[in-house]
Amino acid sequence: MRSRLTTLSSIATLVCLALGAVAFWQGRWMWMALFVVLAAGAQVIRLPWKRQVAFAIAAILLSSVATVAFVAAVDLYLHARYVRTGGYNIWGYRGPAVRAKQPGERRIVMLGGSVAFGYGVASDETIPANLQPLLQAARPQTPVNVVNLGWQSEGAYSFLFTLKDYDYLKPDAAILYSGYNDWLHNTQVFRHQSAVFRVTGYLPIVPIIPLADWLRIRDLSETRDLNRVVFKPNIADRSSSEAAQTALRITQAVERQLGKLVPEGESAAPIPPGTCGERWDYYCGSIRRAADYALAKNQQVFVVTEPYATRATRGGTAGAVIEGWQFHVEQQRILAEMLAVAYKTEPRLHYINMGRAVDLADPALCYDGVHLTAKGNRQLAEHLAPEIMRAWTW
C-alpha cells in the first residue's frame, strides 16, 4: 500500500510539473504556480501527518508573503518606469516624492485636473515643476517645494478630498486651479476611491497602466494584411503580460476587501444655493469648501483661473468656439464675484486670473485646445509666479 502511494505520488508530481512547464511557456503565471504547489503537495502525502500539518501552515504563510512581494514588485517596477512619462510616484502624486518638511521650507500644493497634472508632457515640464524654480529664484534664502496634486479629469469637487488626503505634506499654500472640468457636474475623485491609498497612503499604479503600452505592442506585431494585425509575443512578453494581469487581479481583490472595511468618510455639505446661480452653485460650493478647509489649516489659498478656452468641446464651428470662450469667461467671472464677497475680509485668499496668460489657439503652446505643451506650461508658470509673490507675504 505504501509503495503504491509513493508511485502515485511520483506520477502526480511529474504530471503537475509538466503542466506547470506548459503554463510557463504560455505565460500563465497563476496556473504555473498552482501546478508547482500541487506537485509539492503530491510529495507531502509521503510525510507523517504532523509534518503534513506543519508543511501546510508553512505553505500558507509563504504563499501569502510571496503574493504580496510579487504584487509589490510589479507595482514598484511600473511606478519607476512611468513616474516621469505620465504616471505618479508611490504616494499618488506626480514628480519626485518630497521629504519631510524642513525648518523654514515653504511648501505649496497645486490641485487641478489634467492641465495641472501635465497631460502630454513629462513630469518636469508641468506647471508646478516650472513654478518651483521661479519661486525659489525669487526667494533664494527660502527652500521652496511645489507639489503637483493634479489628476486627470478631476474638478473642484475633488479638492477637499485631496487636501485632506495630503494633510501630512503640511503645505503652507494651496493653488486651486480649475475651470474646464467643471463645465459639467463632476464628482470624480480618483485617489480617494482607492482603499489601499486611504489606509496606507500608497497608491497602486497597476490599475491605470495600459498593458499594450507596457509591453510595447508595436514591437510585437506582425501585419498580415491591411485589415488585420496579429500579435506574436515571445515567452518573455507572455510572462510579462500574465504578471501584470495577475498583479492587477490581486490588487483589485485587495481593493474590494479593504473597501468593505475602510469607510470613505463624508464630504462637507455644499454651500447654500443662490450664491453663484443654478448653473455654477456646485462649482462655487466645491471651491469654497476646499478654500475654507485650507484656511482653517492656516494656509494661503490661491484660486487660479485656467487659460480661457478658445475651442468648444461641442462642434468645431466658429460660433461654437465663441460660445465655449464666453462660457468659460462667465464661469470664472461668477466665481471671482463670489470670492470677492465671501472672503472680502480674508487676506489669505487670493484670486488670480490666468485666463489670458496663454493663447490656447497657438499650437506651440497648446496642442489640443486645452492641454499645454512644455513651452505653454513654462509660459503660464512665468505669469503665475510673480502674481503669487505679490499676493503672499512669506
Image (spheres, grey):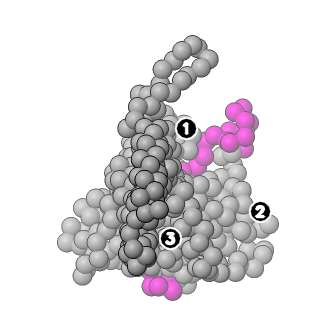
The residue that appears at 47% across and 27% down in the rendered structure is: 232
Neighbour class for label 3 at 10 Å: few (<14), some, many (≥20)? many
Neighbour class for label 2 at 10 Å: few (<14), some, many (≥20)? few
Q: CA distance from mark 1 to mark 3?
A: 34 Å
In depth, the one of 51 and 272 nearer the eye is: 51
Q: Earlier in the sequence, mark 2 or mark 3?
A: 3
Is residue 46 positioned above or below 49 on the image? Answer: above
In depth, the one of 394 and 211 nearer the eye is: 211
Q: Which residue is mark 1?
A: 368
Q: Position of residue 100 (x, y in %)?
A: 29, 76
- Figure disc tally: 3
**Is residue 296 within the magenta segment?**
yes
The disc label shown at residue 196, or none? 3
Nearest to the eye among marks 2 and 1: give it.
Answer: 1
Q: Regarding mark 3 in the picture, which secondary structure is present there? A: helix
Is residue 318 positioned above or below 65 on the image? Answer: above
The disc label shown at residue 279, or none? 2
Q: Amino acid at mark 2?
A: Arg
The residue that appears at 55% across and 84% down in the rendered structure is: 345
Please state if 190 lies on the left or on the right of 187 as rendered: left
Q: Regarding mark 1 in the picture, which secondary structure is present there? A: loop
Nearest to the eye among marks 1 and 3: give it.
Answer: 3
The residue that appears at 46% across and 46% down in the rendered structure is: 15
